[in-house]
Amino acid sequence: MRQSTSNPTQHGNASAAASSRVAGGGGWSTAGEAGGPLWNDETRTGRRWIIAASGLGILASLAIASAAARSLSPAWPCDTPTQCNEVGAHHAQAPDAQPEDLALAARLFKRACDQGHAPACNNLGLAYQRAEGVPQDYRRARASFERACSGGFAEGCSNQGALYEHGLGVAVNVGDAQRLYSQACRRGSALGCSNLGVLFKEGRGVTPDREAAARLFAEACRAGSPVGCSNLFLSEPPAAADRDRTQEP
């Protein structure tokens, strides 16, 4: 059974035990992509980097190539929190991104997050968790995901839950992980639904419930989570085996 978290490649000794069961994952938040829409926003996302917002300004920003983004003044490459998050995502996702690109992206995410932009807070949490542009700091990652979650970005709730489940920068607390995954799933996070399904499948912090797990995996799969689809597929053979056993003479 695979679990989707904010970080497909774990860092540090604290995550070594969890890395074998972590696969896939959410990504940087940009406009109109899947995995974590605003609670009051109907947009879905499906690519790795996410920027949540609306309006013609987004379309213009998304048209900026990575090279063009680098040509902007690193001291002031944006005017609004949405633009800062967009430009930061373009720097971070550039195929040839250099350390200075990641560092600039992290600064832009922080600037936007400090102004209350929830998707940027999620991105800042990813930067701290992955040590991309900033030193790895799970405590700050958790604080950033918490701001994203409380600010209305569902994926932030799921990412925060993953830290609690795997004990990254905080004591393992499956109860808090389950609560945050549930919150994320209810509010549109495919990753949250898939992660919650794993807890039900394995009976971790909840009573084992194969049917509930299958429903959650199906919901995650429909919402565009490849890991949710994989878990749904993997959850079917045992059920078929059980049916076969009940039919044996």
Image (cartoon, rainbow, N blue to C red):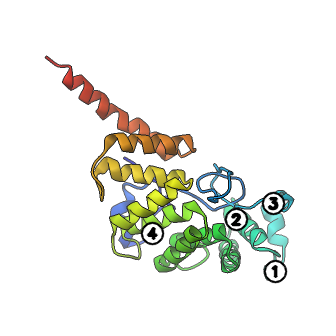
Q: What residue type is labelled 4?
A: His
Q: Quadrant of the C terminus?
A: top left
The numbered mark at residue 76 is 1
Between circles 1 and 4, the one closer to the viewer is: 1
In the drawing, does residue 121 fall left or right of residue 59?
Answer: left
Q: Residue at x 37, y 64 (%)?
A: 165
Label 3 packing within 10 angstroms: few (<14), some (14-19), many (20+): some
Q: Residue 58 carries which label?
A: 3
Q: Which numbered disc, 3 or 1, marks the residue that appears first in the sequence?
A: 3
Mark carried by residue 89: 2
Looking at the rendered structure, the kind of residue marked 1 is Trp
Q: Name the residue under label 4.
A: 11
Tag 3: residue type? Answer: Ile
Q: How far apart are marks 3 and 4 (CA)?
A: 33 Å
Mark 2 or mark 1, which has the lower sequence index? 1
Residue 183 x, y percent position in the rendering = 48, 60
- For the residues labelled 2 and 4, say whether their Cβ atoms are less than 8 Å apart: no
Q: Quadrant of residue 172?
A: bottom left
Residue drawn at the location 45% of the way across and 59% of the way down: 181
Mark 3 and 1 residues: CB-CB less than 8 Å, in contact? no
